[in-house]
Image (cartoon, grey):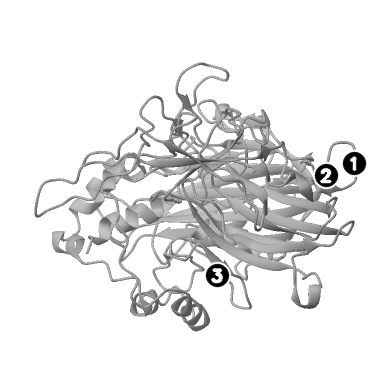
Amino acid sequence: MKPLLPLLLLALGAAAEPPLRAAHGSGQAEGFSRLLAKPLQAAQSASAASRHSAPVPPLSRPYVSSLKPQLDADQSRTLAQAIPAKTAAPQVPAPGRVPVQGQSPVPGQPAAATKAPLNRTGPAATPQPAQTVLRRQTVAPLAGGLDRVPMVNDNNPELIVGPGILFSGFDPRRGWNGVPLPRAAAHLNSPLNGAFELFSHHVYAGKPESLDSTLWLAVVAAPRGDRPVRLRLRAGSTALSQSVDGQDPAAPFLPLPTLLPQGVTPIWSGPGSRVATELLRRERSPLLPSEWVLPPGQLSTLLVLPIPVRGLDPLLNGRNLQLRLDSDAAVDIATLAAFGDTRQPPPAAVWAQLLQGELSPKEHAPSPKGSPGPMIYSRVSGVEQGSAWRGRLSDPGQTSLAMSRAPISWPIAALERGTFGTGQVQTPPLSAFYPGSAWAAHGSYGVEYDLSLPLRNDTSAPLSLQLALESPLKSDQALGGLRFNSVPGKAVLFRGTVEVSGLDGSAGRPLGRQGFHLVLRAGQMGPALGTVTLAPGQQRQLQVRLIYPADATPPQVLSLLPVSAAAEPVKQSQSTPSAAP
């Protein structure tokens, strides 16, 4: 049995939002627990030491039911059926070794070094070299491109340690009522008009002097002009990592199988997984109003949402939020953070006062663009240009995709130093951002991928292909294929839902929309989402949709693979041993 603290740190560490750093040389990831070390040490000192020694329940039906009230009855039954009753508890790395999401290893190295289990009854086990395989195949740039719908990306700081402005698009010369705002550098002067989106992801680690504190997040807005503005919510979702009262929507990091079909009762693991899944299902959270009317000259509070830590050990919680909005005139938007009472949100006057103050402290300054050596991506706080990538994956100059090209893969969420040799960076550019934060929206978090694959059997015999989303080892070099771990790593690099239509159904008829929840680890070949079987000359279109979730680490690939004639992997010895205890 492992203590509860490392499991919770592993879960929340895997939710860390964008990539932070490309490790150089060792491939060692900077642990999320190290990122939280100072606030966590203070918070933990106020907790009883005996609580840290509580054993982790085995991953069984009793464990699933013990997560209530965070799960409703239907979800508990679904997960209890999916998780074997006698599954062994996972080996959890020590807190200082928890991988940070988005860590970028050196091309050709494993996604993250892992910690060997500690043998408490004898000498430590001899580290064994990790084995990788090269699957020879085509890796092609993803066709299509980003739209021009702006998205406010509010993720720096991820760990909020002080109150203040998180993001502000207000004009500091006029504020919301014609009065200048005193801290001009805290505002990006970026009005929004028509269709736009808001993506927000933050973590709160409590206050050392209290076990019952709450961080409150607010979204405020005002018309840029002198007339009222109608703001409509097209779709939106929000979720905590952990609910302390059973009332707030939450999505704990459940130890789910690699592949689960989505059904009437949705499945998710982590708040990013839940938010992306609900948006894919075209749902709107009942916590979110359908519209607002913003009077001119006034600051309107759109949302006030808590991140509570009461009753949690360690004091650590997170929230993900994504809104798809339409305005009938220009508006200014800001997100703010304040500490407050657990049961009562701060009044409107507090938000107006905060908007006239300082920025909440930022974190992780990025490497300069184009600089050599290790790369620190940092986290995003700005306005990105593009919220959806739409593409038709056909042969060059053709209207269809020849099935004989399989095995073939296309990058998803490709980023600087992670293009798999295609040279394609899918990262949305930023039209405005704060100094000391990321200079591009690395990771494409919250971006929807809507892809069509017009397949054509160009051979003289019936042909079957499998469709998969996979998590190969990150590389920026052309390797003649993709590299995978022979045994998937421990770090979870993707938790989210993929929606597919056009797969084989009964009696040879294509299926409609099918949803699949995936949990992919470092260097893992993806499970087949389904097959497509076509006679010679026959054609069929697949449609694939996903929203790149907060609980993921880029990049991944979308793959078409032969069912019975898959490329033979080439074994390669990986000389980097597991990290010593």
Q: Secondary structure at mark 3?
A: loop
- Amino acid carrying label 1: it is Gln
Decide: marks 2, 3 in contact (CB < 8 A)? no
Q: Mark 1 or 3, which is nearer the eye?
A: 1
Q: Residues within 10 Å of mark 1 (few under 14, many from 20)?
A: few
Picture quadrant of residue 150? top right
Q: Are marks 1 and 2 in contact (CB under 8 Å)?
A: yes
Circle 3 residue? 267
Element at label 2: loop
Question: Disc 1 on helix, strand or loop?
Answer: loop
Query: Which mark lies nearer to you, 2 or 3?
Result: 2
Q: Position of residue 427 (x, y in %)?
A: 65, 35
* Quadrant location, the C terminus: top left
Q: Residue at x 57, y 33 (%)?
A: 418
The mark nearer the N terminus, 1 or 3, is 3
Distance of mark 1 from mark 2, alpha carbons? 6 Å
Q: Nearer the viewer, residue 394 or 404?
A: 404
Q: CA distance from mark 2 to mark 3?
A: 32 Å
What residue type is disc 2 on?
Answer: Ser
Q: Residue at x 40, y 40 (%)?
A: 112
Read off the residue under disc 1. 398
